Amino acid sequence: MAKGLLLVASFSILLLNQQPLIANINDDFDHRLYVAFISGNMADWGKVLSELEAIASKNPSATNRFRLLHAQYGYIGYLLGVNKTSIAKQLIDKAEKQANILASIPTYQSTAKAMQAALLAYRISISPYKAPFLGPKSASLIDEALALNPTNYFALIEKGNARHYAPSIVGGNPTEAVELYRKAIELIEKENPASKPQKWWYINTYTQMGLAAQKAGNKDLAKKIYLTILGMEPNYKWVREELLPKV
């Protein structure tokens, strides 16, 4: 199951008469990625990724670049989780190109920096010996992202990931990670007051909060988080069949 990570930016649509069509297309991609994530059927994620690559190639708008980047980011986390390192490396290279372009666009700059930080963290997970060089750069990018936008929940998620997965000797602290994930979740829910968003990156942030609580030794909190997740999405395979039974 993908454990990664993620991020969103505000989407700009230039032609008003195209808004309903574009919104429907985007909602379809989001739904398909969500279903792939909760079911663990990442082959479907790969199919969506191929479609997004074709769309971005034909029309390399900032919106299309970001949607592709976001899907690449999630899929890289999955690839690393199943030890498909060589494919992950290739996708990291592609994703970095998109992130670098988006970082030059003001409305995407904060989120793109958070994504750049995440991609560096992926590189560290592949080659731990690079941590002394890439680790500080990744941390700096997260700080820059939050300086640009302190309420960017994707930057907060990446800061949470850094605290969650880094060794304690270089700043890892799963208890702090729990609070960073919690803050990100609160901001996401504030932006979506009507209902819990069915977005893979939202439910993954909840999942990471549970994993961080477990890592911190707080099994009661982890169990509570996993039960909350299943209350939102009973069909979430990773939590239902793996994480909750093992708490």
Image (cartoon, grey):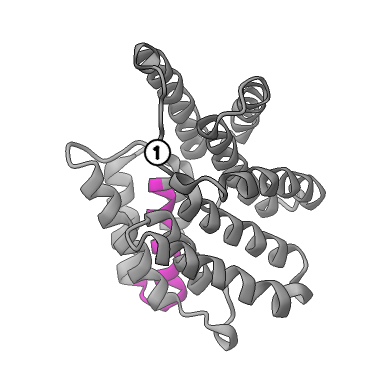
Q: Quadrant of residue 17?
A: top left
Please give the name of the residue rendered at 36% of the width and 18% of the height, measured from the top-left corner.
Answer: 19
Question: Residue under circle 1?
Answer: 199
Q: Is residue 118 above or below residue 25?
A: below
In this rendered view, identify the residue nearer to me: 51 or 247. 51
Would you say the magenta stretch is mainly helix, strand or loop? helix
Q: Is residue 36 above or below residue 237?
A: above
- Residues shaded magenta: 202-219
As drawn, which residue projects farthest toward the left?
194
Q: Position of residue 210 (x, y in %)?
A: 39, 62
Asked if residue 206 is among those painted magenta in the image, a careful observer would answer: yes
Please give the name of the residue rendered at 75% of the width and 48% of the height, measured from the top-left corner.
Answer: 93
Please give the name of the residue rendered at 48% of the width and 52% of the height, measured from the top-left corner.
Answer: 111
Residue 158 visible from this viewpoint: yes
Is residue 91 found left or right of 101 in the rendered image?
right
Q: Position of residue 122 (x, y in %)?
A: 66, 60
Q: Position of residue 187 (x, y in %)?
A: 27, 54
Q: Is residue 144 above or below residue 76?
A: below
Residue 4 visible from this viewpoint: no
Three-letter amino acid code of the residue under disc 1 = Lys
- The C terminus is located in which quarter? bottom left
In this rendered view, identify the residue nearer to me: 217 or 60. 60
